[in-house]
Amino acid sequence: MIFRHPEDAFSPRSHTIADVGGEAPTTSKEDTYYGWTAGAGGEFAITPRIRLKADWLYYDLGSESFRTRSVLQVEPGDVLVTQRSKLDLTGNTIRGGVIVAF
């Protein structure tokens, strides 16, 4: 048996962006992202009671951009530093299993 997965998707996420050197402020955000998923899979009967199953899913929940600013104190004056980051919420999932009918 072969099947496909066209579906809507959502995921609550929390992420933090921090400067490694500790100079820039930490940016945190919690949100729920909405997107879509698609995939395919199949099942193969080994016996009338035992089947193997495998499927693949691709998900796309969009992306999020961040901008943080910090002031670095250096001689003879201060320097304003802007850091931009982009978080892509996409990925692939591969699953497999054994189905046993009782």
Image (spheres, rainbow, N blue to C red):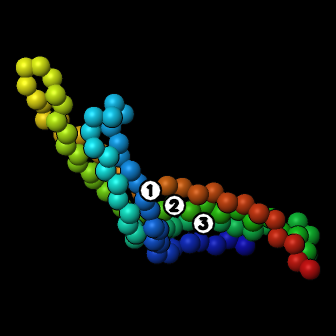
Considering only vertical position in the picture, is 91 above or below 30?
Answer: above
Quadrant that contains the C terminus: bottom right
User: Where is mark 1, residue-wise?
Assistant: 90
Q: What is the distance, in whole Å, between disc 2 and disc 3 at their CAs?
A: 9 Å
Q: What residue do we see at 15% from left, 23% from top?
A: 74
Quadrant that contains the N terminus: bottom right
The quarter of the displayed image where residue 25 is located: top left
Measuring from the top left, give residue 37's x and y in whole percent: 49, 68
Q: Is residue 84 visible?
A: no
User: Where is mark 2, residue-wise?
Assistant: 58
Farthest residue, direction left: 76
Considering only vertical position in the picture, is 57 above or below 2?
Answer: above
Are the two marked residues, 1 and 2, in contact with CB atoms closer than 8 angstroms?
Answer: yes
User: Where is mark 3, residue-wise?
Assistant: 40
Say which label, 1 or 2, has the lower sequence index. Answer: 2
Q: Nearer the viewer, residue 39 or 81?
A: 81
Say which label, 2 or 3, has the lower sequence index. Answer: 3
In front of the other: label 1 or label 2? 1
User: What amino acid is labelled 1 in the image?
Assistant: Thr
User: What amino acid is labelled 3 in the image?
Assistant: Ala
User: What amino acid is labelled 2 in the image?
Assistant: Tyr
Q: Is residue 70 visible?
A: yes
Q: Nearer the viewer, residue 8 or 81?
A: 81
Q: What residue do we see at 81% from left, 65% from top?
A: 98
In the figure, is residue 33 to the left or right of 3? left
Q: Secondary structure at mark 1?
A: strand
Q: Nearer the viewer, residue 18 or 98?
A: 18
Q: Secondary structure at mark 2?
A: strand
